[in-house]
Image (tube, rainbow, N blue to C red):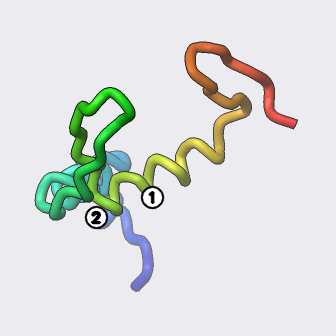
Amino acid sequence: MSVTPELVEKDDGGRLIKKIVALEAILADPGEMVTDDQGREFVLPPSVVAERDKSEESAWPFALIGVIILPRG
């Protein structure tokens, strides 16, 4: 399929794909239940959300570790 001005207009400047991804995350089954060392239970995000977060994070020029921001490399 070729990219046409009409198709770009329907995409709304790249916002449509973001809306589709957000809807997919909402509709996805939740991840597994985990318990921390203090006995609190948490439900992990759906795998589609976790994978998207990982791919976005790999593009960041820094790494988040707790509250400390360290440069990559």
Give whichever of 51, 30 is nearer the camera: 30
Give the class, few, some or many, for how many residues have Cα within 10 Å of label 1's Cα (few <14, many ≥20): few
Q: Is residue 33 left or right of residue 52?
A: left
Locate residue 63, reporting x and y percent.
Answer: 68, 31
- Looking at the rendered structure, which numbered label has been put on residue 51? 1
The furthest residue to the bottom: 1
- Identity of the residue drawn at 34% across and 61% down: 48
The residue singled out by tag 2 in the image is: 6
Q: Is residue 15 visible?
A: yes
> Which image quarter: residue 70?
top right
Residue 56, position as x, y percentages in the image: 53, 46
**Residue 23, label in figure:** none
Looking at the picture, how far across and down is residue 42, in whole percent? 24, 40
Asked where in the image residue 32 lies, by quadrant, the reply is bottom left
Q: Amino acid at mark 2?
A: Glu
Q: What residue is at 55 percent from the left and 53 percent from the top? A: 55
Residue ID at (37%, 49%):
14
Q: Quadrant of the C terminus?
A: top right
Three-letter amino acid code of the residue under disc 1:
Glu
Residue at far top of view: 67
Instruction: Assess whether mark 2 and mark 1 are in contact (beta carbons under 8 angstroms).
Output: no
* Pick the front one: 46 or 40: 40
Q: Secondary structure at mark 1?
A: helix
Above or below 68: residue 5:
below
Mark 2: secondary structure: helix
Q: CA distance from mark 1 to mark 2?
A: 31 Å
Q: Residue furthest left?
A: 27
Closer to the camera in the image, 38 or 53: 38
Please name the residue shown 79% across and 25% down the image: 71
Work out whether 63 lies above or below 25: above
Where 10 falls versus 43 (above or below)?
A: below
1 or 2: tag closer to the N-terminus = 2
